[in-house]
Image (cartoon, rainbow, N blue to C red):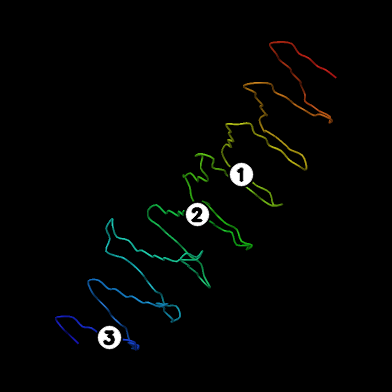
């Protein structure tokens, strides 16, 4: 079937069925497939793959998937038996004009972020405007470990409090507590204050006052 002016196959309201036990090969400068009803492109053979690719290259080449749907799953990607892997040789951006949910399903598996990276920085949160970083954990607690230093800085009054149990601050080479402005207070109102040590030194450039 060959025509210099083109080939038009019209089924009108009836079905157009192309069936073969071999391959179907369609080539063209541009290919457009449109449907006015729900449609699918499916590979049903076991251990067979479906590839959607733009392989020509160039800075403006893209693979675009669009949906005009307004539901929460307007674009729905599911792996019913295996996983989903997304790799990029450049920047990988995930943005939304609304809430972004990652790992919100109630399943008993870990969520890993940045666990395989090295010589890089993992940044979470923003310091712009009224942005807030909220860390929550259940009875398993929050564990922070590092082979380097830990620095926690704030530009406003702050607290580190336990509602139950003891708060322990320990340093293998000592503990240094500084106040660069205002008073330094150790307050045990209604409780005992116990300071123990091999030596106890109090140095001041002014008076020392002990009241009971």
Question: Disc 2 or 1, which lies upstream in sequence?
Answer: 2
Q: Residue shown at 74%/17% (left/top)?
A: 202
Q: Secondary structure at mark 3?
A: loop
Q: Is residue 132 left or right of residue 159?
A: left
Q: Residue shown at 46%/53% (left/top)?
A: 97
Dot 2 crowding, Cα within 10 Å, few <14, some 14–19, many 20+: few
Query: Which mark, by number, is residue 145?
Result: 1
Q: Is residue 26 left or right of residue 180?
A: left
Q: Which residue is mark 2?
A: 98
Q: CA distance from mark 2 to mark 1?
A: 33 Å
Image: 32 above or below 172 = below
Q: CA distance from mark 1 to mark 3?
A: 67 Å
Q: Residue shown at 27%/64% (left/top)?
A: 56
Question: Disc 3 or 2, which lies upstream in sequence?
Answer: 3
Q: Secondary structure at mark 2?
A: loop
Image: 71 above or below 89 = below
Nearest the viewer among 93 and 33 is 33
> Where, by quadrant of the figure, is residue 107 drawn?
bottom right
Dot 1 crowding, Cα within 10 Å, few <14, some 14–19, many 20+: few
Q: Which residue is mark 3?
A: 10
Image: 64 above or below 147 = below
Quadrant for the N terminus in the image: bottom left
Instruction: Please state the horizontal and vertical placement of residue 47, each as a whole percent of the image.
Output: 44, 78
Image: 117 above or below 23 = above
């Amino acid at each position: 079937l060959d025509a210099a002016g083109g080939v038009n196959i019209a089924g009108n309201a009836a079905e157009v069925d192309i069936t073969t036990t071999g391959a179907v090969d369609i080539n063209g400068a541009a290919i457009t497939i449109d449907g006015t009803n729900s449609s699918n492109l499916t590979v049903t053979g076991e251990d067979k793959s479906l590839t959607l690719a733009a392989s020509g290259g160039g800075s403006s080449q893209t693979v675009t998937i669009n949906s005009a749907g307004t539901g929460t799953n307007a674009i729905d990607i599911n792996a019913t038996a295996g996983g989903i892997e997304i790799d990029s040789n450049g920047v990988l951006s995930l943005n939304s004009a609304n809430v972004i949910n990652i790992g919100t399903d109630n399943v008993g598996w870990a969520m890993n972020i940045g666990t395989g990276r090295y010589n890089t920085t993992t940044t979470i949160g923003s310091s712009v405007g009224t942005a807030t970083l909220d860390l929550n954990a259940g009875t398993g607690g929050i564990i922070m470990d590092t082979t380097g230093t830990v620095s926690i800085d704030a530009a406003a009054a702050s607290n580190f409090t336990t509602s139950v149990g003891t708060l322990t601050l320990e340093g293998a080479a000592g503990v240094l507590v500084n106040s660069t402005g205002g008073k330094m207070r150790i307050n045990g109102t209604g409780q005992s204050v116990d300071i123990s040590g091999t030596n106890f030194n109090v140095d001041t450039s002014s008076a020392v006052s002990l009241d009971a």
